[in-house]
Image (tube, rainbow, N blue to C red):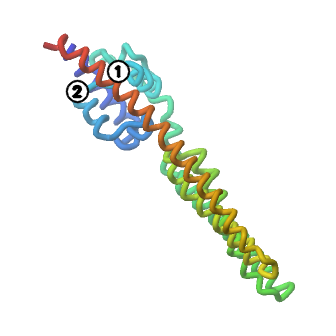
Amino acid sequence: MNDINQNIARNLLKLRKNAKLTQVELAEKFNYSDKSVSKWEKGESMPSVEVLKELANFYGTTLDALTKDEDVLEQKSIEPVSLSKDKMFPMRPIITLLAVSAVWLCATIAFAIVKIVAEINFWYVFLWAVPLSCVVLIVFTSIWSTKKRYLFIEMTILLWSLIVCIHIQFLKFNLWPLYIVGIPLQIAIILWGALVKKKPNKKRKDITESKNQQNNNNTPLSN
């Protein structure tokens, strides 16, 4: 059993390096800590069978191949199926910032055109750029990021910046009750954030318990 564990550890280390992933990046993909990944690759502990299967699929290999000697993997020259997608990982922040920059560029162009053509100081267009930027960030965060706390922050800024924009845009109207309306909406965002945060934690707990149970079952065999 120790030989199989060592084979798995060596193969996981080799496959991760071939995929040009850090332990932190791999850990985020499987909702584990980088310390857990380090223990896997040192053979100090093993993930559950379900996680090993997911790792095998991720790297484009089989569960059986992970348990074989390292030379078997070298002969197959396995390349991770998601390697092409991982190349996009460093570009995601840049693409997101470019999208946000496009919002502010449009706001600047609109300000300049109105100022030149109509000679109106259209300064509050920059206020509206704030909630629009939040909408862009929410879209990209929903698509790419696994850290939902960013969504909570972005939705909060969107809510209150939108209320401020509407209030300033229509100052001649008595719109201060909008801030009162924002309170229950903020509470709803907080409750949603707590609900979303609790789900991945439960999943991680279940996976961790499964992993610990497997390690306990393997202990007598290794002795």
Please indicate, yes or no, whether residue 46 appears anywhere in the rendered image.
yes
Question: At which x and y percent is residue 34?
Answer: 32, 41
In which quadrant is the C terminus drawn?
top left
In the figure, 122 relative to 186: above or below? below
Left of 55 or right of it: where is 219?
left
Q: Nearer the viewer, residue 217 or 41?
A: 217
Q: Relative to 21, is 10 on the left or the right?
A: left
Residue in the picture at 47% in, 37% down: 200
Residue extending farthest bottom: 119
Q: Secondary structure at mark 2?
A: loop
Q: What kind of residue is marked 2?
A: Gly
For label 1, the SS is helix
| Location of residue 104 (image quadrant) | bottom right
Residue type at numbered disc 1: Leu
Crowding near pointer 1: few (<14 within 10 Å), some, many (20+)? some
Q: Residue at x 56, y 49 (%)?
A: 191
From this viewpoint, is residue 132 visible?
A: no
Identify the mark nearer the N-term, 2 or 1: 2
Say whether residue 206 is left or right of residue 71. Answer: right
Q: What is the number of the mark on residue 89?
A: none
Above-or-below relation of 3 to 105: above
Instruction: Identify the image quadrant of the N terminus.
Output: top left
Q: Residue furthest top?
A: 221
The residue pinned by badge 1 equals: 73
**According to the image, label 2 marks what residue?**
43
- The image shows residue 126, relative to residue 117, as above or below, that is above
